[in-house]
Image: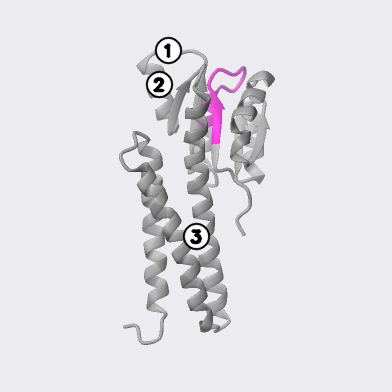
Amino acid sequence: MVQKAKILLVDDRPENLLALEAILSALDQTLVRAASGEEALKALLTDDFAVILLDVQMPGMDGFETASHIKRRERTRDIPIIFLTAINHGPHHTFRGYAAGAVDYISKPFDPWVLRAKVSVFVDLYVKNCQLKEQAALLRLQLEAGETPVLGELSARLAAVEEQAEALVKQLDGSADTAAAATAAHLERKLAGLRKALDALRPGSA
């Protein structure tokens, strides 16, 4: 069973972390605080996160440097990063954020509804991906044990995940959030691959 997704909140100011928690609490996920880039990297060593909200202006290791470290690690390179900044330095500053690996860049003060909606998309994608991994792992275990009757149950479970993924893709259709749409399309391709492999295991398949 997929547990709650973890969302990493990185900001050196406690009041900002408190505000983020207030905005995102409605998503009913696990919110993890980090007061510095170093603290964020330490948290990423042991936990998996659906998305990272990363403040740009921090003393010591700033958001850009922190993101660079995250993207260099194989374990964490695919975690979506949303940069938060209190200062809009123009296109060059924004470009630097995307170059560092951010999927989005939001200037403070931001619209709480918009931020919550963006984070919600990445949480949904994370949960669907976890469900896909669980189904694949269960399939491997059952095949190794020679228990083919489970194929029907697996097919039904996979169908449920496929239905949820399809609904999410439709929700993102035409969205300006290209990173989320690309991630959803990638998830759909993985689901199609698993479905093809499952169908090939059915009796009488060519």
Q: Which residue is mark 2?
A: 94
Mark found first going from the N terminus, 3 or 2: 2
Residue at 40% of width from left, 59% of height from top?
A: 190
Few, some or many C-alpha atoms within 10 Å of disc 1 (few <14, some 14-19, many ≥20)? Answer: few
Q: CA distance from mark 2 to mark 1?
A: 8 Å
Answer few, some or many: residues within 10 Å of disc 3's Cα (few below 14, many 20 plus, some between 14 and 19): many
Which residue is the site of mark 1?
89
List the residue tagged with mark 3.
132
Q: CA distance from mark 3 to mark 2?
A: 34 Å
Q: At x 65% / y 21%, what residue is drawn?
A: 12
Q: Nearer the viewer, mark 3 or mark 2?
A: 3
- The label shown at residue 184 is none
Q: Position of residue 202 (x, y in %)?
A: 41, 81
Q: Amino acid at mark 1?
A: His
In the rendered view, tell whether residue 167 sits above or below residue 62.
Answer: below
User: Which tag, 1 or 3, sits closer to the chain's start?
Assistant: 1
Q: Which residue is pictured at 51% across the width and 17% down the height?
A: 108
Mark 2 and mark 1 residues within 8 Å of each other at the beta carbon: yes
- In the rendered image of this protein, does residue 71 appear above or below residue 115? below
Amino acid type assigned to the residue bearing label 3 in the image: Leu
How packed mark 2 is, by other alpha carbons closer than 10 Å (few <14, some 14-19, many 20 or more), is some
- Asked whether residue 77 appears in the rendered view, the answer is no
Residues in magenta, as a range: 52-67
Q: For numbered disc 1, what is the local secondary structure?
A: loop
